[in-house]
């Protein structure tokens, strides 16, 4: 008999405590951000898809077309093609494409590159309507940024 | 001609009351739908609807338009006449109780001597609508939701009736206007706090709101008895639910919170409705607050709570009331 | 479904499919229920809807490149899966990890554990019908995700640990933010207790639901918070210590009843213990390298069998590697905790109401991709 009433009172009190928490939350400021109209600042360490780094001295990329990133990639997304031109020491990069539909953002390419020519970008608004939009031409993106 | 002349005022009165009833139902759904979503948002530390209109105020209007434009899908092998009939059955019985509620001293559709019994009778038609809707959908989840709601609603009508009876014994009448008028010095919530609490709990269970919302348990049964309904059928269920909430909160206001009594305003026979609506919406705010705070009870615990806690307490309350009234 | 099962006295049961798409099976899991009224008399889980052949992929890739796949198996405990795999390869090849890297691994793994438990907490309460605690839990979780995003670059499927250390060092900003987060979460625990733990409705939903005993756990291989809820204080971080866990002072919370409430409380208290570990690790953080100096580019694994176990948020996670001398493994076997935890439901959940089945499955904390791999 006593437990009947004590259960009733402890139960009712726990319900009131819960109500107190929610009413306090109702009058607290909101913590969400209305996305398209306000955007949050994203940290520069965010791992977006890779991009060629622009070297400050030469004004262009540092890639030597060795193909290490292509070999290290676990998902086979990178295609690097370089050609030998006359009068130029080393290979000249002609094609650098990334198939972002297969990339798992592991970072093996960035860490394997001997000249540190690759780095992550900060692109996170990447919605598209066709698969072809995600076959990035990284060399062209570098040239467009110059 | 004579008979038409004599019944014409009454006829006009009925039509006007019907139109007012419809306005109340749709207006209430607009206001309550918006308030629920905004309050739910702020409890969850987010803003709620913000896109349509200033701070989302036109959201429900556009939701209504969208639902009206959707295709009415009838599942294969569903019982089509019953399937189409169930939402109508959920929506139609809300009009008569709205005519009986005294919004203020002069604003009432009809005043029947047995007003309270009529309102309770119409409120129980909702059970039939849910059962028909769940059964005719040809979906096992809907069926589970439907037969949970039958036992839940039938069980919780008893404490609802018993707690209202305690007030009836004090005022000796079933008529709503007289009960509202009998609370002049002090409201009945002060005299009968236990009956008020029991009524509030059974009110939440009757309208299938959380924490008693097993018939439409969203995470167990993927929307329960109204899983298969889309478009206007679904919105009829929702309108019926919000109108039911309005009716049971108005009954609570009339019986326990003094109806339209409050600080006198000019033309108080008509403007008393302002106090009435304030009280009703305060109770509805409380219902919304409770919905977003508690988890759902399990089905047998819900029934245990009714039979082992609410009914004994309401019977004891009734007994004490009767004894005290007899002695005074 | 075998037809002979549905005969005789079972002919008045009906079969309900808690199908691959259901709001409360966390992922693509199908449970075929035989209901008698509202009581679930017989349950049979059907898995495999998310099978992605991870173990087969491991036989075709160099062992070092398998790291992103480990994160995809349990997306909520990705750093811990990474740690287990990195440990496996370090054991196989004999590479030594600098002390600072071990401390960073422990700090990030414990943050990951807290994040996983917070998400479980919110999602479990959403299954039970409480719509707001998930929002509060996600609010706290966002802070962890921001801290980890700053150092690892990702928010959910991390690929941060490497063979020989971690890929990026932490800085003072990380330390300050983590300390602020620890204070913040500690101050939020009373609010969670008020809103959820003491609530009478929740207690009625969780008590005596899905009772496990040490015997059932031993037969099915259940580990993790479920086993600790039955009273057995078995935690890989204490029983088979790895990394630098022996240097920290933390308790292993246990309960005795073994029902859903017991594992609920165990997980809740584990969050507090993880905060203690992080605090101690931040205090003792040594200087040094964050990655071993000489890690060969082509990691050849000597022939033999290697094994590594870690304590994932859901139980014991083990990797078993059979190598044949090249850099591509011959066979990699991954033992995930949710697979064993799920197999208890035909025994513990038969004869329960449907609401209790939902509650019991939520308390198992299943993540289906790690069952299907």
Image: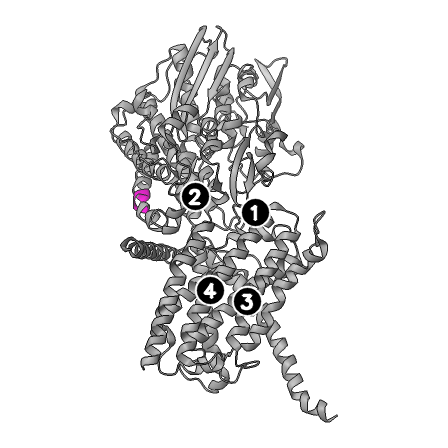
From the image, tell me which residue sits under label 4. B158
Residue B123 numbered mark, or none: 3
Label 4 vs 1, first from the N-terminus:
4
From the image, tell me which residue sits under label 1. B222
In the displayed structure, B200 sits above or below B98; it is above
Residue B9 picture location, percent across and down: 65, 88
Residue B109 picture location, percent across and down: 57, 80
Residue drawn 55% across and 41% down?
A: C35
Quadrant into which the N terminus of chain B falls: bottom right
The kind of secondary structure element at disc 2 is helix
Q: Of discs 4 and 1, which sits in the foreground?
A: 4
Determine the chain carrying the residue at label 2: C
Category of crowding for the residue at label 4, using alpha-carbon neighbours closer than 10 angstroms: few (below 14), some (14–19), many (at least 20): some
Category of crowding for the residue at label 1, using alpha-carbon neighbours closer than 10 angstroms: few (below 14), some (14–19), many (at least 20): some
From the image, tell me which residue sits under label 2. C122
Category of crowding for the residue at label 2, using alpha-carbon neighbours closer than 10 angstroms: few (below 14), some (14–19), many (at least 20): some
Q: Which residues are magenta?
A: C184-188
């Amino acid at each position: 008999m006593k437990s009947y009433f004590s259960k009733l009172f402890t139960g009712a009190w726990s319900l009131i405590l819960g109500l107190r928490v929610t009413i306090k939350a109702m009058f607290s400021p909101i913590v969400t951000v209305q996305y398209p109209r306000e955007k949050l600042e994203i940290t520069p360490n965010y791992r977006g898809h890779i991009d060629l780094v622009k070297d400050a001295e030469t004004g262009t990329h540092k890639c030597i077309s060795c193909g290490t990133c292509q070999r290290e990639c676990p998902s086979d997304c990178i295609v690097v093609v370089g050609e030998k031109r006359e009068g130029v020491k080393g290979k000249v990069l002609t094609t650098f494409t990334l198939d972002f539909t297969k990339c798992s953002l592991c970072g093996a390419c960035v860490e394997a590159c001997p000249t540190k020519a690759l780095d992550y970008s900060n692109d996170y608004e990447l919605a598209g309507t066709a698969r072809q939009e995600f076959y990035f031409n990284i060399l062209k993106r570098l040239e467009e940024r110059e | 001609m004579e008979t038409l002349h004599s019944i014409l005022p009454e006829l006009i009165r009925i039509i006007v009351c019907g139109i007012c009833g419809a306005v109340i139902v749709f207006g209430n759904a607009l206001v309550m739908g918006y308030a629920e979503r905004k309050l739910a948002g702020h409890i969850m530390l987010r803003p709620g609807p913000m896109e349509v209109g200033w701070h989302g105020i036109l959201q429900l209007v556009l939701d209504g338009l969208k639902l009206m434009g959707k295709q009415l899908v009838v599942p294969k092998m569903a019982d089509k006449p019953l399937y189409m009939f169930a939402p109508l059955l959920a929506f139609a019985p809300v009009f008569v109780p709205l005519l009986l509620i005294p919004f203020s001293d002069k604003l009432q559709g009809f005043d029947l001597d047995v007003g309270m019994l009529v309102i309770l009778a119409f409120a129980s038609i909702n059970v039939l609508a849910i059962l028909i809707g769940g059964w005719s959908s040809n979906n096992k989840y809907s069926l589970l939701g439907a037969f949970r709601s039958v036992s839940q609603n039938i069980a919780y009508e008893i404490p609802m009736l018993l707690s209202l009876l305690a007030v009836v014994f004090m005022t000796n009448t079933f008529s709503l206007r007289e009960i509202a008028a009998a609370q002049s010095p002090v409201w009945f919530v002060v005299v009968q706090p236990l009956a008020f609490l029991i009524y509030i709990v059974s009110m939440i269970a009757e309208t299938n709101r959380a924490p008693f919302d097993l018939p439409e348990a969203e995470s167990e049964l993927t929307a329960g008895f109204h899983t298969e309904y889309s478009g206007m059928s679904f919105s009829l269920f929702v309108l019926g639910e919000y109108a039911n909430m309005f009716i049971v909160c108005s009954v609570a206001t009339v019986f326990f919170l003094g109806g339209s009594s409050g600080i006198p305003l000019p033309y108080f026979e008509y403007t008393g409705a302002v106090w009435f609506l304030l009280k009703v919406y305060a109770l509805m705010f409380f219902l919304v607050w409770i919905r977003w705070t508690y988890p759902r009870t399990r089905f047998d615990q819900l029934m245990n709570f009714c039979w082992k806690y609410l009914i004994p307490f309401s019977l004891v309350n009734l007994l004490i009331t009767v004894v005290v009234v007899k002695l005074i | 479904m075998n037809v002979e099962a549905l005969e005789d006295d079972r002919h008045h049961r009906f079969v309900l499919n808690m199908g691959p798409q259901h709001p409360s099976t966390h992922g693509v899991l199908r449970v075929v229920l035989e209901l008698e009224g509202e009581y679930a008399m017989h349950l049979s889980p059907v898995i495999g809807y998310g099978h992605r052949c991870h173990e087969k992929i491991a036989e075709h890739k160099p062992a070092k490149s398998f790291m992103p796949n480990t994160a995809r198996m349990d997306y909520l405990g990705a750093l811990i899966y990474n740690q287990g795999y990195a440990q496996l390869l370090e054991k196989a090849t004999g590479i030594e990890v600098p002390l600072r890297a071990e401390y960073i691994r422990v700090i990030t793994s414990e943050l990951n554990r807290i994040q996983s438990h917070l998400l479980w907490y919110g999602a479990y309460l959403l299954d039970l019908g409480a719509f707001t605690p998930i929002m509060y839990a996600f609010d706290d979780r966002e802070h962890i995700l921001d801290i980890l995003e700053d150092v690892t670059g990702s928010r959910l499927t991390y690929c941060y640990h490497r063979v020989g250390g971690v890929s990026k060092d932490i800085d003072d900003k990380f330390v300050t933010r983590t300390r602020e987060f620890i204070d913040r979460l500690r101050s939020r625990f009373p609010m969670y207790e008020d809103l959820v733990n003491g609530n009478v409705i929740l207690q009625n939903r969780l008590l005596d639901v899905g009772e496990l005993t040490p015997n059932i756990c031993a037969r099915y291989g259940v580990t993790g918070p479920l086993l600790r809820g039955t009273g057995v204080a078995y935690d890989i971080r204490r029983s088979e210590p790895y990394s630098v866990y022996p240097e920290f002072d933390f308790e292993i919370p246990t309960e005795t009843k073994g029902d859903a409430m017991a594992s609920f409380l165990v997980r809740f208290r584990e969050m507090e213990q993880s905060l203690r570990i992080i605090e101690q690790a931040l205090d003792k953080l040594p200087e040094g390298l964050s990655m071993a100096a000489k890690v060969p580019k082509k990691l050849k694994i000597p022939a033999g069998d290697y094994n590594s176990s870690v304590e994932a948020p859901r139980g014991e996670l083990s990797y078993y590697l059979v190598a044949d001398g090249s850099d591509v493994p011959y066979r990699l076997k991954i033992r995930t905790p949710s697979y064993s935890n799920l197999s208890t439901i035909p025994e513990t959940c038969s004869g329960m109401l449907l609401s209790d089945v939902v509650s019991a499955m939520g308390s198992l904390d299943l993540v289906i991709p790690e069952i299907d791999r």
